[in-house]
Amino acid sequence: MSVTPSDNEDAYFQQRERELREQLREQLDKAAGELRDDRKNDTLSLSDRIAALGFTGEKLKVFDLLPLVHVAWADGSVSRKERTAILDVLRGRGIQPGTEAFRTVESLLEERPSQAFLDQTLAVLKEAVGGARAANIVDLCVQVAGASGGFLNMGTVSDEERALIEQIANQLGGPALAEFNKQLG
């Protein structure tokens, strides 16, 4: 079988896409570390802290979905079904493949975000969402955790995923915690 120019072109663009996602991941982890270490972050507005984490412009559309990414990584790896579930949520919001927001989430699903990134995004998210929106985030987290299924695809949630969803619910408070207790409590 011979290699055609289009094969080389496809390989080039796939490699370039991987490199861009890697750069995005590195930028996000670096931003989270800087925000954590920055003593003046108490004086930054909510929108400035979200921007400092690397979520500006189109990427703002996915900021509230970051807990789903963290839950997918809770047991050490992201399954194909968890990845599909998260990307389906993006598509359901009208976020299409190839967009900056979509690529950001894809990059976070390829390599586990740092603990600093998790801590900072949850701290900021706590201020950004509440009420029904916070409960919806917990519901989506449970759906992602159950996506890999278990025995006969019965949607089991691992202990690690459950603990992280509980942490997210506690951080988001009130309705989020009620949703956690309703589904996993």
Image: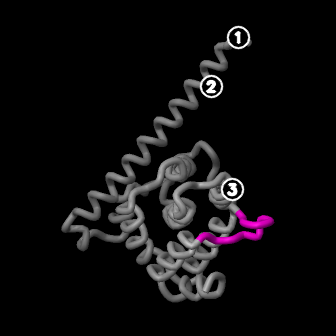
- Does residue 151 show up magenta in the picture? yes
| Residue position for label 2 | 10
Kind of residue indicated by mark 1: Ser
Is residue 143 rendered to the left or right of residue 112?
Answer: right
Q: Residues within 10 Å of mark 3 (few under 14, many from 20)?
A: some
**Nearest the camera: 100 or 3?**
3
Residue at position x 69%, y 71% from top? 156
Q: Examine the image and state in which quarter residue 8 appears.
A: top right
Residue 141: image location, x then y, percent: 60, 70
Q: Nearer the viewer, mark 2 or mark 1?
A: 1
| Residue position for label 1 | 2
Is residue 41 rendered to the left or right of residue 91?
Answer: left
Q: Which residues are magenta?
A: 149-158
Residue at position x 56%, y 70% from top? 161
Does dot 2 land on a helix, a strand or a loop?
Answer: helix
Prevalent SS, magenta region: loop
Does dot 3 land on a helix, a strand or a loop?
Answer: helix
Residue at position x 25%, y 73% from top? 42
